[in-house]
Amino acid sequence: MKGRHRSAGSSGGALKLGTAAVAVLVILAGSWYAFRKYSQPSCGNAAKLSIGAPADIAPALKAQASDWSAQAKLNGNCVDIEVFEEDPADVSAALAGKAGKALTGVGQANGKTRVPDVWVADSSLWLQRLRAVNAQGIPQDAKSIAHSPVVLAMPEPIATTFGWPEKKITYPDLITKVATDQKVKVGIVEPSRDSTGLGGLLTLAAAAQAAGGGNATQATQVATAALRALASGRSSVRADLIQKFPRSSDPATLSSGLTVAPLSEQAVIQYNAVQPPVRLAAIYAEPSPPALDYPAVVLSSDKASIANELLKSFDTQDFHDKLGAIGLRAADGSTGKGFQNPSNAPAPAAAAANALPDAATIEGLLTKWQAITLPARMLAVIDVSGSMLEPVPTAGNATRMQVTLEAARKGMSLFDDSWSLGVWEFSTLMDGNKDYKQLVPIGPLVSQRAQCLQALSSITPKRNGDTALYDTILAAYKTVQEGYESGRINSIIVMTDGENDDPAGGLSLEQLIAELKKVADPAKPIQVILIGIGNKVNEGAMKQITDAIGGGTFVAADPAKIGDIFLQAISLRGQATQPK
């Protein structure tokens, strides 16, 4: 019995020791939990920061933001960073909209567009354009965080025929070839909404001036032809444009595919990374277009301190390596790990240069681009009075009628199938008591191009006909107005070699202007383009008409130059005068 009692006592002591041990463990565990809880920063009230950026740099920003946020948490600062993809054009539309303005070709903001605390655009061209319409809304201290030159992307088998990679290729050489060689198929991403497209367009437009050799008319002709070629190969988004490059190196496929397009260096690197059947050459043509420089702008003032701390991390080698992995350079043009340098790429210092034109130059060019490329609805009205039979010595004694019709035919070749066109002829008493005659009603060129060309071929001057110019202009204006189509440039283009001369009386200049103003509808603007041929036109009266109702007056004192004037008139439609 005693032994059993001792045994029971010993067992009780062991139980007490076990219970004590458990208690100690619980206390220690609780202490460790408390230590862990209070030694880590609480993120229940973490600061929020949003970053909006284009898709081409977003992966590097997301990775950097995640790393920086984790390090900030260890340092006792909790920041919840959201990086989301947003098209720079959409953000720009929203920011311009805050000032009640709209950028040319961009339009109103998408209702789903988010304006972030920190905006990373792909190019400072967006900031340049925005400051012209909302100077107070765009800070001046934008910081470039990455870089990608705008290059000419060209299938390598075609690039070698241009002398790549040894030969230096210039934009003036390219623009001349584009304007004269129909085998060269040039493409572009819509420049009013894409920075690579805009950079390429700015450089090509400047090249057109150089190709003109100082001759303004010739430069306009080259530029208009080149812009029409660009327009025929334009795409709304970059992915669609890239799909137009040839997928096989056989001659037939190469000749039918896209020949050349301005794209970012990164786009070419990423295209070649998937080992396509035909690689793209990145041609660093001169002069260099404005590069993508990815400016970061802090739009939310109350988030500025956090945002600026984050922006400091973009100067690190770690971030540069993240950029290099997706084909982007650092802001200074240097390259991080993983960057696949294209053949014949420039030195980093040269790649970092980025000169920007002023906002007025940018918007002026985009207005011209819109005028040439937007779907248009036009009524062409051609003078067939007797004086159009006069020979033109500077055109080999071809008649005024012949040089005018040739200009009209060449001009028509610039109009793509999205245009609608009608053709009238006028003199006096052409159709009963009417001084004009409809040859082709206004309709889509896709279905009546041949009919319009046939009509031009059939036009012959009325030997004893006079020039009922004013009555015809009013009738043409009302006709275009009746079938007005929104989303298009609705216009009348009148080609005449004389001033108003109507034996039956007709409208006076003052009566015409009064009638035009009476029927004009601001919601349905119609541009009146008057082209004078020879030295007998009344340019002053023509200007009074176009100044009053909206449009432009152009005079070819030498009728042989009518083709150049026609091109100039078409290219400047978007810059024509507004009604006074």
Image (cartoon, rainbow, N blue to C red):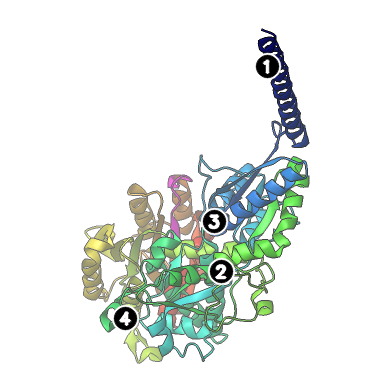
Dot placed on the residue nearer the N-terminal end, 1 or 3: 1
Q: Amino acid at mark 1?
A: Ser
Q: Amino acid at mark 2?
A: Gly
Mark in front: 4 vs 3? 4
Residue range of the region highlighted in magenta in the rendering:
519-529
Above or below, 388 against 100 in this view is below
- The mark nearer the N terminus, 2 or 4, is 2
Disc number for residue 11: 1
Q: Is residue 177 above or below residue 50?
A: below
Residue matched to label 4: 249
Q: Residue at x 59, y 69 (%)?
A: 148
Circle number at residue 104: 3
Residue 309 visible in the picture: yes
Asked if residue 520 is among those painted magenta in the image, a careful observer would answer yes
Cα–Cα span, label 4 and label 1: 91 Å
Q: Give how far across and how far down residue 421 sits, in percent.
A: 31, 62
Residue 239 horizontal side relative to residue 41, left or right:
left
Secondary structure beneath dot 4 equals loop
Q: Is residue 563 magenta?
A: no
User: Callout 3: helix, strand or loop?
Assistant: loop
Q: In the rendered structure, which amino acid carries the disc numbered 4?
A: Ser
Q: Quadrant of the N terminus?
A: top right
